[in-house]
């Protein structure tokens, strides 16, 4: 047993991070958030396709990269850190099945948990979306529709999708922890950095603990592919992303409550991801049933 | 990332399983938890069996009498013994899990030869004399004094919360060898001594825990003579040695318990299905969440073990604090849920094992460094936040 990233996995993670930092950095994120109704950056989508992001799991014989679920999770963790918008999970799962998905030329979305993100911008929609009604999405970077059914849950693709969502949540949880720590070291009050105050310190410590526990769960589920582990990973990663964003907001004080700070974007996206895929109630019931 | 075990690891596991299946039925019944001498005999008898079978000190270096096994093999050992319901390390906790490893890493050859084999054989029990009435979380402010007289230190002061003091042969003792002054900050004048518990001048006064047992005690030291040769590490360098001890205490000592908690969780579900409490969706979901929690804590353990195996240092890192923080609270949640499963009549019955465990779980967020102190450690040493005043 050697439950650590291999050299190749590290390189993959660093590579994806580099691409995203070059192509979708903080300024791009702000630009997208401030530009009114969200629109999908198709050029970026194609670049991701060219870089092999969507075809990571497609076998090499079929023109893909031929890697496994663990590598996919590492890539999606980076997407979550960067808060990359778009129906990434649905397009990824469609690669190899829907023409153009792997290359990033076809944008695919899917109904999940009674919601459909990016319905109007997508080229292909999976699942039953009849009767879709637009919502005023809380997340300025994710347009949402409500659908009457739940989109039909429970298949293997759903399990994999939930794990990729959990990986994005993990990336976000790690990022908000870093943001809080950075701010706590810079911001001074009462003549010292607020990070020297224990109340702030303890918020930050718990953020790290949440992220690390979720990381162990998500990575392990990506290695075993086990259904119960995936349910647990989704549960813990949802919680880590939402709670960490809230604590990060608290550490930022009044600044955290502004549109200018990126914190709210992480919180809102964490809520969206929590709403997609397996709910906490369902995950808990599944885990209980397996006891 | 690879969660499969190697052929070698799997054959180690198989051999251990077979030995456990053969050995556990031969064990005498466990003594009453309040019978300390009985428990000492039982716990050390178990250690002796491990020793005879070659499973003692698996993770200790070979030159310390151990098997020099990899951290992964040690993990398998903990997993299999807990799964099989083998006796807990009990009275041998301090010797095997932190005093021993500290001596193995910081002691001289003579010190290793003197103290380590009896720990592995189950002949000698150790206790930990760190805390004092006025030095708990602020351990470095300890006041127990030791001054030199010929080849001895003469030690006076008092210790508190000393687990197993009543039945211990040796004590890993922290003393102040140089008084605090403008030039000597409190961390500087401390030394780490091995004190024989039968030395004249030692008085042990048992303290009763909220569970009714006398698992810890107050220890009064009145001019106790401890040979200078019993000092581990340099004089006044005891704080550094202490950090090694504490990293073992937090890093590895709780690992096997996660497996035990998963077993208890399964028992809770079985009991709830039997007594009708399973129909309560709130309780069911609570158990489901705990399953995710302990599953993740087990994976985190594997992560930490792999990390230390790669680092090859042997001494666990501060990651132990991350684990201890989450685990101690999860364990309390588990036994809260056990109370729910049992219902009032069961939860109020001290005759039920889970009720006793529920009481003892309350110490987990205090002993070995409180949760508040662990959060300071995580924030300052892992996240690099500034030290507070
Ligand atoms: C079951 C059990 C077994 C033990 N066994 C041993 C043993 O064998 N040997 C031994 O040496 N010790 C032992 N201990 C002692 C244990 O290590 C101490 O109890 C612990 O370190 C806390 O110290 P304290 O009890 O003096 O509490 P205090 O330090 O007085 O703490 C009281 C409260 O104040 C909080 N607090 C203190 N300082 C800070 C701070 N800087 N920031 C925020 N909050 C703070 C604490 O978190 C706690 O909530 C044992 C304790 C228990 C419960």
Image (cartoon, coloured by chain):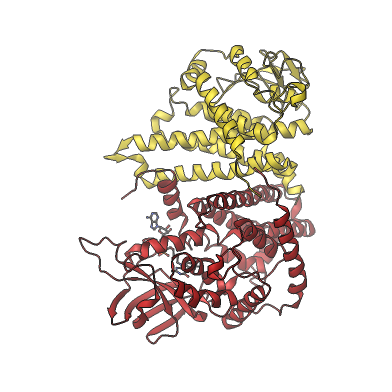
- What color was chain A assigned in the picture? yellow
Instruction: Give x and y (percent) for residue A85.
Output: 59, 21
Q: Nearer the viewer, residue B266 or B377?
A: B377
Instruction: Give x and y (percent) for residue B14.
Output: 75, 62
State the residue at coordinates (41%, 33%): A252
Q: Which of B294 and B8 is in front in this view?
A: B8
In the figure, is residue B183 to the left or right of B74? left
Using the rendered view, name the quadrant where residue A142 is placed. top right
Q: Nearer the viewer, residue A179 or B105?
A: B105
Q: Quadrant of ligand 1?
A: bottom left
Relative height, residue A68 to residue A117 (above, below)? below
Q: Nearer the viewer, residue B216 or B153?
A: B153
- What color was chain B assigned in the picture? red
Relative height, residue B193 to residue B365 (above, below)? below
State the residue at coordinates (58%, 74%): B120
State the residue at coordinates (71%, 58%): B268
């Amino acid at each position: 047993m050697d439950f650590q990233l291999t050299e190749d996995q590290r390189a993959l993670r660093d590579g994806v991070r580099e691409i995203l930092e070059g192509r979708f950095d903080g300024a791009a994120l702000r630009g997208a958030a401030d530009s009114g109704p969200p629109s999908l950056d198709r050029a970026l989508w194609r670049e991701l396709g060219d870089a092999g992001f969507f075809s990571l799991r497609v076998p090499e014989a079929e023109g893909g990269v031929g890697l496994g679920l663990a590598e996919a999770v590492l890539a999606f963790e980076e997407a979550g850190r960067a808060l990359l918008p778009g129906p990434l999970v649905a397009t990824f799962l469609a690669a190899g099945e829907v023409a153009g998905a792997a290359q990033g030329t076809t944008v695919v979305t899917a109904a999940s948990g009674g919601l459909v993100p990016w319905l109007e911008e997508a080229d292909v929609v999976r699942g039953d979306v009849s009767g879709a009604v637009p919502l005023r999405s809380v997340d300025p970077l994710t347009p949402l529709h409500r659908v009457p059914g739940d989109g039909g849950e429970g298949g293997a693709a759903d399990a994999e999708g939930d794990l990729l969502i959990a990986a994005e949540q993990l990336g976000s949880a790690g990022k908000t922890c870093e943001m809080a720590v950075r701010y706590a070291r810079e911001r001074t009050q009462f003549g010292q950095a607020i990070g020297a105050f224990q109340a702030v310190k303890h918020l930050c410590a718990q953020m790290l603990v949440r992220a690390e526990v979720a990381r162990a769960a998500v990575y392990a589920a990506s290695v075993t592919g086990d259904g119960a582990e995936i349910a647990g990973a989704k549960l813990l990663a949802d919680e880590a992303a939402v709670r960490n964003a809230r604590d990060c907001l608290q550490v930022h004080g009044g600044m955290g409550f502004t549109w200018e700070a990126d914190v709210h974007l992480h919180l809102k996206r964490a809520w969206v991801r929590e709403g997609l895929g397996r709910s906490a109630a369902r995950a808990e019931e599944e885990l209980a049933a397996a006891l | 990332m690879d969660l499969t075990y190697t052929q070698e690891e799997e054959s180690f596991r198989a051999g251990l399983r077979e030995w456990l299946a053969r050995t556990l039925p031969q064990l005498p019944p466990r003594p009453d938890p309040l019978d300390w001498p009985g428990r000492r005999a039982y716990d050390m008898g178990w250690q002796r069996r491990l020793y005879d079978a070659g499973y003692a000190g698996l993770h200790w270096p070979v030159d310390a009498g151990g098997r020099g096994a990899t951290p992964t093999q040690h993990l398998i050992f903990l997993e299999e013994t807990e799964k099989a319901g083998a006796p807990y390390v009990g009275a041998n906790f301090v010797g095997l899990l932190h005093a021993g490893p500290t001596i193995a890493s910081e002691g001289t050859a003579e010190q290793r030869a003197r103290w380590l084999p009896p720990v592995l054989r189950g002949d000698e029990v150790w206790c930990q004399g760190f805390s004092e009435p006025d030095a708990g979380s602020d351990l470095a402010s300890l006041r127990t004094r030791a001054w030199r007289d010929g080849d001895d230190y003469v030690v006076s002061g008092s210790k508190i919360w000393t687990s197993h003091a009543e039945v211990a042969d040796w004590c890993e003792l922290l003393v102040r060898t140089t008084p605090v002054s403008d030039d000597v900050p409190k961390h500087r004048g401390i030394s780490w001594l091995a004190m024989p518990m039968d030395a004249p001048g030692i008085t042990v006064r048992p303290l009763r825990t909220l569970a009714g047992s006398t698992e810890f005690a107050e220890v009064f030291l009145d001019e106790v003579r401890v040979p200078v040769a019993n000092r581990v590490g340099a004089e006044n360098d005891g704080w550094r040695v202490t950090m090694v001890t504490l990293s073992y205490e937090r890093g590895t000592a709780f690992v096997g318990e996660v497996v035990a908690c998963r077993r208890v969780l399964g028992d809770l579900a079985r009991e709830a299905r039997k007594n009708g409490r399973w129909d309560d969706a709130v309780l069911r979901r609570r158990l489901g969440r705990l399953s995710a929690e302990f599953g993740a804590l087990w994976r985190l353990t594997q992560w930490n073990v792999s990390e230390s195996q790669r680092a090859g240092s042997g001494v666990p890192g501060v990651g132990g604090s991350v684990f201890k923080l989450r685990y101690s609270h999860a364990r309390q949640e588990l036994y809260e849920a056990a109370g729910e499963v049992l219902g009032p009549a069961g939860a109020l019955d001290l005759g039920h094992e889970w009720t006793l465990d529920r009481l003892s779980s309350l110490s987990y967020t205090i002993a070995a460094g409180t949760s508040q102190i662990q959060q300071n450690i995580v924030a300052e040493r892992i996240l690099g936040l500034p030290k507070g005043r």
